[in-house]
Image (tube, rainbow, N blue to C red):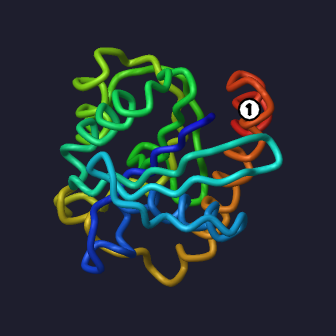
Amino acid sequence: MKWIVGLGNPGTKYEKTRHNVGFMALDELARRHSIAIKQSKCKALIGEGMLPGGKVALIKPMTYMNLSGEAVRAFMDYYKVPLEDMIVVYDDLDTEVGRNRLRYQGSAGGHNGIKSIIQHTGTQSFNRIRMGISRPEPGFAVVDYVLSGFSKKEVPLLTQSIEAACDALEYSLDHTFEQTMAKFNG
């Protein structure tokens, strides 16, 4: 079973913010395959279902971004799943809106959710899809920026990014992550 962790913050206040693109991608994948992400377990909301490439668990940590690793660790320990089967989907300041970057390892790059996952798993080696949110204009605090919404002109790019992330996730179920990176990193 593959398990996909979308990072974000719980609550309607954060729903459409830049920091929640991981949740947005999971919601779209769930919609495509009629999976309900509503089982509350392991400090997360979880939805399980079958995709053409196999069984999948969709996980939205409810711990707030900075503690995302707690939900990842709880899920790993409860279900005894290997880290190699996990893909984390999250926002990335260093990639422009509309673009995604796939990686299988690396530092947190200042992202507190990834920092927490690294801390709770003890490794930087795990599959990830970084969804671009671009950097703020000079003088705009990063913390305020990631908790802000997308502009009207960014919405089509966001939609494109979400669709591409879902396509990559579907492809990764019956291909290696290296093959998925080669196809979707363009």
**Quadrant (top left, top right, bottom left, bottom right) of the C terminus:** top right
Q: Amino acid at mark 1?
A: Thr
Q: Nearer the viewer, residue 158 or 141?
A: 158
Residue under circle 1?
Answer: 180
Residue at 22%, 24% in the rendered image: 119
Total numbered labels placed on residues in the image: 1
Residue at 44%, 25% in the rendered image: 80
Is 29 on the left or on the right of 124, as rendered? right
Is 137 on the left or on the right of 88, as rendered? left
Q: Is residue 14 above or below residue 79?
A: below
Residue at 21%, 55% in the rendered image: 64
Q: Nearer the viewer, residue 55 or 160?
A: 55
Residue at 38%, 48% in the rendered image: 93
Which of the 4 quarters of the picture holds residue 12?
A: bottom left
In the image, residue 71 lies at what x, y percent? 29, 42
In the image, residue 136 lies at what x, y percent? 31, 59
How many C-alpha atoms fall within 10 Å of the one at disc 1: few (<14), some, or many (≥20)? many
Q: Is residue 49 above or below residue 68?
A: below
**Quadrant (top left, top right, bottom left, bottom right) of the N terminus:** top right
The residue at the far bottom in this view is 152
